[in-house]
Image (cartoon, rainbow, N blue to C red):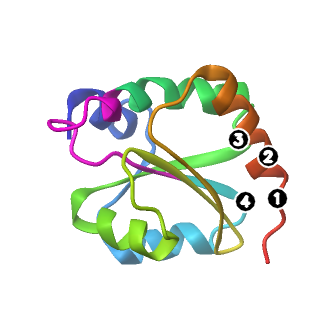
Amino acid sequence: MAFLITRLTDELGWARLEDLGAFEALLAAPGAHCVFAPGDPARNLESTDVAVILPEIRQAFQNRFDVAIATPAVEQDILKAAGVFKTPSLIFFRDGAMIGAIPKVRDWDDYMARVTRILQLETA
């Protein structure tokens, strides 16, 4: 992972999903969760852009969701389980179910609108 991505776990203390057990524990926890699937930052420069924007998004929503970073060891499994195929992606879960995803880098207003809609959704 690039420095800007590892900073999210090392400096901000966000969870690092090293295995599927950690992912399942996150899904079992109460509240809304965002899993950041960065992809390969060496091949996709958007990954580090999202890593920079994500703390600002969380702050704008007054920490209404927690964030975990998918490591390469589990990223493809999480993407497949969520039905998301592009990276970087922000994948939102509540009550053990996916409630929405935002693939690729977006402009600020798009993030604000999409996250608002996602957080308003009920789980099935």
Q: Which residue is mark 2?
A: 117
Please report whichever mark, 4 or 3, sits nearer to the chain's N-terminal start. 4
Q: Position of residue 38 (x, y in %)?
A: 34, 45
Q: What kind of residue is marked 3?
A: Val
- Give the residue at x 41% y 69%: 78
Q: Which mark is residue 64?
A: none
Q: What kind of residue is marked 1?
A: Leu
Mark 3 Cα shell of 10 Å, populated few (<14), some (14-19), many (≥20): some
Q: Is residue 68 magenta?
A: no
Q: Are marks 3 and 1 in contact (CB under 8 Å)?
A: no
Q: Which residue is mark 4?
A: 31
Mark 2 Cα shell of 10 Å, populated few (<14), some (14-19), many (≥20): few
Q: CA distance from mark 1 to mark 2?
A: 7 Å
Q: Are marks 2 and 3 in contact (CB under 8 Å)?
A: yes
- Give the residue at x 62% y 21%: 108
Residue mark closest to the camera, 2 vs 4? 2
Q: Which residue is mark 3?
A: 115
- Give the residue at x 26% y 29%: 45
Q: Is residue 103 above or below residue 98?
A: above
Q: Which residues are magenta?
A: 35-48
Mark 1 Cα shell of 10 Å, populated few (<14), some (14-19), many (≥20): few
Q: Are marks 1 and 2 in contact (CB under 8 Å)?
A: yes
Q: Is residue 32 above or below residue 57?
A: below
Please report whichever mark, 2 or 4, sits nearer to the chain's N-terminal start. 4
Disc 1 on helix, strand or loop?
loop
Position of the C terminus by quadrant: bottom right
